[in-house]
Image: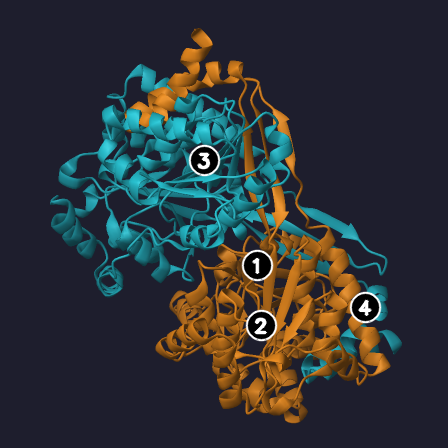
Chain colours: A orange, B cyan
Amino acid sequence: MPVFLSTRDADFEDQFTALLGAKREDSPDVDHIVAEIIADVRARGDAALLDYTAKFDRMVLSADQLAFTAEEIDALVAQVSDEERAALEVAAARIRAYHERQMPEDQRWVDDSGAELGWRWTPVSAAGLYVPGGLASYPSSVLMNAIPAKVAGVGRLAITVPTPDGIANPLVLLAARLAGVDEIYRIGGAQAVAALAYGTETVRPVDKITGPGNAFVAAAKRRVFGKVGIDMIAGPSEILVIADKDNDADWIALDLLSQAEHDESAQSILITDSEAFASDVVAAVEKRLETLERRAIAGASWRDFGAVVLVEDMDQAAALSDRIAPEHLELCVADPDALSEKITHAGAIFLGAWTPEAIGDYVGGPNHVLPTARSARFSSGLSVMDFVKRTTLAKMTPAALRAIGPSAEVLAKSESLEAHGLSVTARLQKLND
Amino acid sequence: MPVFLSTRDADFEDQFTALLGAKREDSPDVDHIVAEIIADVRARGDAALLDYTAKFDRMVLSADQLAFTAEEIDALVAQVSDEERAALEVAAARIRAYHERQMPEDQRWVDDSGAELGWRWTPVSAAGLYVPGGLASYPSSVLMNAIPAKVAGVGRLAITVPTPDGIANPLVLLAARLAGVDEIYRIGGAQAVAALAYGTETVRPVDKITGPGNAFVAAAKRRVFGKVGIDMIAGPSEILVIADKDNDADWIALDLLSQAEHDESAQSILITDSEAFASDVVAAVEKRLETLERRAIAGASWRDFGAVVLVEDMDQAAALSDRIAPEHLELCVADPDALSEKITHAGAIFLGAWTPEAIGDYVGGPNHVLPTARSARFSSGLSVMDFVKRTTLAKMTPAALRAIGPSAEVLAKSESLEAHGLSVTARLQKLND
């Protein structure tokens, strides 16, 4: 049974604070192992990659087998059913259409002083996407990471995906092809991250690495950060559903379970203003858990981290939601737009009962890589913005320098940076000659 | 003497690679000390802050003295000369005007399926700005960090600034006031970062921490990342000047020195297509170094990390610039706009000889917090975007769900996420009832 809280309880504040602070994940300390692997890949390149792949993925490869050939991709992609291919194409098209609107615009203007100012956006030249192998090898994640990169204009996009015992997921390869990925390597773990960051004889280095992974991959991304850019290190997934009594309890139960089935550390929370509806949802969850394929995982998540919070009204619900700052937020109420206006911190909002969160995982269009663990207070989901960077521009005229240069001279002097001031003074003197 | 390279040299590629790879900074490993300080502040709150302030800043305070009072700020601000106040006001107004154009726009649209999609930007609720004490206590940096936060709409903006032996910089306090900072604490070091991230009895926690600092501050920011957002950890400053022979060698020398005077680890590079001009600049640098106030620092930087690169034409210059990915790039050539079009990776570009980099440090308008150490390949300078976050929005109609829901069902099944699929199926069944 999940924890049950009510804002009417005298100790609600303590209970809610405990819920917010609950630690859901133990990160094993693999940092020293990862440091060794990275150093080894930097020192020995392909040879190190081949050794680790033999050891961890039980595959003896030669260097020219590190990358999938076009023929190998063709053969695997041909295994995908027409139905699955069509579904991936719908998803890719919708994700692309959404992200194309995110491309930021250059600006350039002349201000009162005559100075020309502005900025310009350019894509990252090369990006690498880590794709997990095995159970968490999600083709949808390939689309969600690769399409924004390609929309941004990334010139070279490489994927690394481990293929333990030689087993590759055809859907992952098709997703990569649909997204326009340029290179696919059958490597994984910290060694794949090291190869993307530093390069080997076969793998050319990239400038930015994104994508989910296990503790080794996360530790490797932290270590190479600075040498290359990385996306956020994601924690276990979360959903908050705010629902009034006029909902189908089974729909809400399934929405809660679709987060819970990801991971035993996932968290599903229901906030409602109806005690009867809360009971109905809890019962519906229990019923679904009897037959759900992943009932062991979903059941553990719901039991250990699930929560139901009873509120007096939806204003209370919005205030609590902002304290949770959920990764996914469903607003299953009569006027979801009005309620959403009261929400400040959330990775993604799903408006109304016809918008299950799972739509957002696949075909809605918005990205499903979203800030976890309350980081929606200060960060955003993956987007085109993660694959572009801004160069600011400034161009003075003699008149502009005459107008604003003296202020720079004063401030340089006050900061005891004489050469800063002199670089302006020398130019102003020329104007006065 | 700085290193001198020519693209005509047989070993140019090796020399240039060595220049790019040169390590300019030794980061002392203070991580275990910082971990202790953070744990102590979390455990003991204000009491820990007061102890560290007594120890490191030689100031015995009580908790109610941790924050500057309005009267204390008034008294300090009154010490600022009219000339300095006016210069700060010019800088603040120009920085504000530039950053106001960066505010991103919300979007909302209905697509072919009838689904309503979009996103919304909201400000970070509370931000903290670390301001160093002593020599590196720059009022210009207060403006550059605080104004974007306030333009973004950050509700509560706190500054921490150590005041060793009780000495505060009146210009820093005035800059904070001009920028609209809400709270100013006389604390510094890892303990200040810990207080901003976790809060104490006196210091309320924030969601994002920005600003420069020493090795302790940098290590503390790395440690609290995740609990709060942080900006990039800046390395030593750099400038690349691309100049043709039609320049005043003394201007260019001063521009190179205005980076070199920051720090012995700073790096100043000149790329030119004229050997004679290169010699003139080197001579002009030597001459200025005879009298420059900070000649010890600037001289060491120029000697150890300065470089002059002779190229055959400006296309070569642009290509080398992209490999350097400089923090600051000056284009002192006849047509700087045309040359800038050939540049992809740079934090800030200063167009033409009338635009010394120092203008950008103070009054140009663009931010002076910029990506160092080649990170302009994948990241941008500080901006309003660092203080806002995006919430994506999706709203299905029954018709939209009927159109795209089946693709989600197929993909959920292919990823073995049954509840994901069922959450769509249950709704589609209702439509078919």
Labels 2 and 4 share a subunit = yes
Question: In the rendering, at what x and y percent does residue B231 appear?
Answer: 43, 50
Amino acid identity at mark 3? Ile
Nearer the observer, A278 or B271: B271
**Circle 1: is it few (<14), some (14-19), or many (20+) Cα within 10 Å?**
many
Are both tags, 2 and 3, on one chain? no
Residue B420 lies, in percent from the top left, at: 69, 78
Q: Position of residue B249 (x, y in %)?
A: 42, 24
Give SS at disc 3.
helix
Q: Which amino acid type is shown beneath numbered disc 1?
A: Ala
Label 2 vs label 1, nearer the camera? 2
The answer to the question of whether label 2 and label 3 lie on touching residues, with beta carbons closer than 8 A, is no
- C-alpha span from label 2 to label 4: 34 Å
Q: Residue under circle 2?
A: A202
How far is the residue under mark 1 from the one under mark 4?
26 Å
Badge nearest the viewer, 1 or 3:
3
Q: What amino acid is labelled 2 in the image?
A: Thr
CB under 8 Å between callouts 1 and 3? no
Position of residue A381 measured from the top left corner of the image (x, y, whole percent): 59, 60
Instruction: Identify the mark nearer the N-term, 2 or 1.
Output: 2
Left or right, A346 with respect to B261, comes to right
Q: Give the labeled residue for mark 3.
A: B147
For mark 4, what is the residue? A90
> Of the numbered discs in the image, which one, if any, rests on residue A346?
1
Spatial separation of the CA atoms under disc 3 and disc 4: 43 Å
Identify the residue at image location x=39%, y=49%: B234
Mark 2 or 4, nearer chain start: 4
Depicted B123 relative to depicted A164: above or below? above
| Res B358 quadrant in image | top left
Assess disc 2: are there few (<14), some (14-19) or many (≥20) residues with their C-alpha within 10 Å of its C-alpha: some
